[in-house]
Image (cartoon, rainbow, N blue to C red):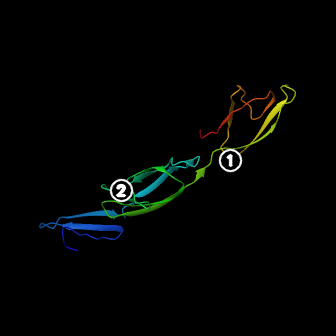
Amino acid sequence: QTTAKISNLATGIYHIKVTDANGCIDTMHIGINFAINPSLTLNHKNVICSDSNGFVTTSLVRAVEPVIYKWNNGATSKDLINLKAGKYIVTVVDAKSCEMIDSVIITDEPGPKISITSVQSYCLKSNGSINVSISNGTSPLSFIWNNGSNTQSITNIPQGNYRLTVTDKNK
């Protein structure tokens, strides 16, 4: 071409030759590359104990502000909080109309479920026991009985009322 400006070039190496009115010549080589697309990353925390405490955070690289967020639950914020278990899909569009879509599945990490088998004490002796089985929950588990014991099951106990608190890693 013979113009000072050209646009809409494809990727490649271009040789530029300029000649002035005196016949002086200068040459140059220039490479044109496609722009690197922006990228979207989602990070999340799963729901703990069937509550609404999950969240999703977004991270954008090379996006041009302003950026618009549209989530499948109707939200338009950058991040989501107080989530229940489920699939969350986000569409992000930047100022250059680059569209990014990503999704994450928030799962439920249920709390511990307790099953108890007891043996009654007899003859006013401390010969009773409470055996505890735990399902679900995330290890390590901690046990606190109202009699001060911190074991999963208790033995050699007298008649009485006993209360057990089981806490998993997720609290």
Q: Report x, y in % for residue 141.
A: 68, 37
Marks 2/1: CA–CA distance:
42 Å
Q: Residue furthest right?
A: 123
Image mark for residue 103: none
Q: Earlier in the sequence, mark 2 or mark 1?
A: 2
Q: Report x, y in % for residue 28.
A: 28, 62
Residue 156 occupies quadrant: top right
Q: Circle 2 sits on which residue?
A: 63
Secondary-structure class at tag 1:
loop
Residue 64 occupies quadrant: bottom left
User: Left or right: where does residue 157 sit relative to residue 82?
Assistant: right
Task: Report the amino acid beneath label 2.
Answer: Ala
- Residue drawn at (87%, 27%) of the image: 123
User: Left or right: where does residue 11 sit relative to residue 136?
Assistant: left
Q: Report x, y in % for residue 134.
A: 72, 43
Front one among 67 and 13: 67
Task: Report the amino acid beneath label 1.
Answer: Asn
- Residue drawn at (62%, 48%) of the image: 110
Quarter of the image with the N terminus is bottom left
Give the vertical position of 72 relative to 110 (above or below).
below
Q: Circle 1 sits on which residue?
A: 136
Quarter of the image with the C terminus is top right
